[in-house]
Image (tube, rainbow, N blue to C red):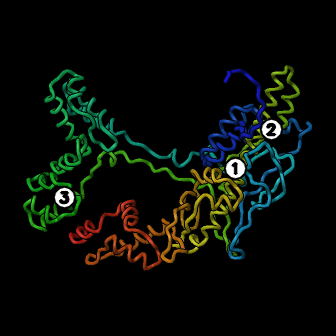
Amino acid sequence: MAISQRLDLRQTQALVMTPQLQQAIKLLQLSNMELQDFVQGEIEQNPLLERPDGDGPDGRDGDDARAGDAEGPMAEPPVDLPPMRDAVDFAASDHMAPAADAPLDADYGNVWTNTDAGESGVEGTDGLTNWQTRGGGAGFDGDEMSLEQTLTRGPSLRDHLLEQTAVDIKDPGDRLIARALTEMLDDAGYLVGDIEGVADQFGCPVARVEGVLARLQRFDPPGIFARSLRECLAIQLREKDRLDPAMQALLDNLDILARRDMAGLIRVCGVDVEDIQGMIAEIRALDPKPALAFEPVVAETVTPDILMRAQPGGGWSIELNAETLPRVLVNQRYHTRLAGSARSKKDREYVAERLQSANWLVKSLHQRATTILKVATEIVRQQDAFFRHGIEYLRPLILRDIADAIGMHESTVSRVTANKYMSTPRGLFELKYFFTSSIAGADGQSAFSAEAVRFKIKGLIDAETAGAVLSDDRIVEILREGGVDIARRTVAKYREGMKIPSSVQRRREKASQF
């Protein structure tokens, strides 16, 4: 067969990831707090974007700018969107019909239709140029300091240790070794790495480094600079003058203590039951991670993206959290001024490109909000029994169930539920929480949520008594009597996932009563 060149015409279909599509996908998977940062970055880059209070990159006050251009061709004041919310009455209908309009995620095509109020309760407005939340909200641009900014911080653990080093260690060489050992501490206060490396670094004997380490182990907080849990506990007991041979034997056999083997501990320590219980109580009072107690981590509060409330007449009200949604608008009057003053082709192209980018940002924000609201509403409809009666009524749910109900693709639902939290009457939940695998019922027809089965297993174990500890096999029998067809290995996997010890360990713990 001869090799030759030729021309062929082929017709194919492919999805082109336009910049607008990429932006819409990116915004969809951001939480409201991440969206605030993204929008702020866009405002800094685009002179046509500004916040409703006039915080724009052009440095002008928004109200003054609009007043100065009042005679321009686009002098109408911007129109605000009403609160984006949805009310769902499950008492009137067991099923919610899918939206009548086209799917919002239809390739995120370059089409923007501004219709009247639809299923989500969002009213369209001709010439929509802004994205604004109700109530204004203080946001992050106010003058008042947030609660996080009022938190006080004491000296760090490193500074605390170096202050003690300056007082306790006089030799300059030993101070250098002490500083090197201080830099080798992990977050819990344990010494990581080997002291031989420190000795090689300073060209000194290992015995000198060990001597400095022994002095550092007497510093505050007690237990600092330990190389293992056993050494950490031994340092603290030595501070209390309680490190006798029996206690040292107990520290040397922490694995037996972890198994709750009272008989084994009595044998290796050579004490009676009363003494071993007192020794264990002393160890429980120690701090296995001394650095964490000295430098506590400030917990970060999770801000919900969706708010869910019960309606007085029945059903649920679902709305986006307006306090965390960004507020931004497109300044059409400023665009008119810039376009009129542009002289070169490059300037005109830049102004047109900035206007297109600003408009697409506003449309993507609106599309994101509507999509999140539709997904959250359908999740609430599917899990109505959970919100009314509790976790035992949580239904098995997968992404395809929500996608088919609202006419979207599974990938879109997956992006919507990522990093999104909903505040409900039963607490704050990540949207991913409501998607659980299914466990078949004993009758072969019904199905149970894996999360609800975990709750049942935990409830059975919590109700145990010292004389009636349930084995995994017995838990399987009880669940099957309740209609759940589950294997023993699944029960063991769920139990271990909840950090619940085996029946043998639980029996020893209840028998020892410590």
In the shown orientation, is residue 292 left or right of residue 175?
right
Q: Earlier in the sequence, mark 1 or mark 2?
A: 2
Location of residue 324 with respect to 465 vertically, above or below:
above
Location of residue 363 with respect to 429 vertically, above or below:
above
**At label 3, which amino acid type do we have?**
Ile
| Label drawn at residue 331 | 2
Q: Nearer the viewer, mark 3 or mark 2?
A: 3
Q: Position of residue 193 (x, y in %)?
A: 26, 34
Nearer to me, 433 or 12: 12
| Label drawn at residue 256 | 3
Cα–Cα span, label 1 and label 2 = 21 Å
Residue labelled with disc 1: 368
Q: Earlier in the sequence, mark 3 or mark 1?
A: 3
Q: Position of residue 23 (x, y in %)?
A: 68, 40
Mark 3 and mark 2 in contact? Answer it, CB < 8 Å: no
Badge 1: few (under 14), some or many (20 or more) residues near its Cα, within 10 Å?
Answer: many
Q: Quadrant of the C terminus?
A: bottom left
Cα–Cα span, label 3 and label 1 = 55 Å
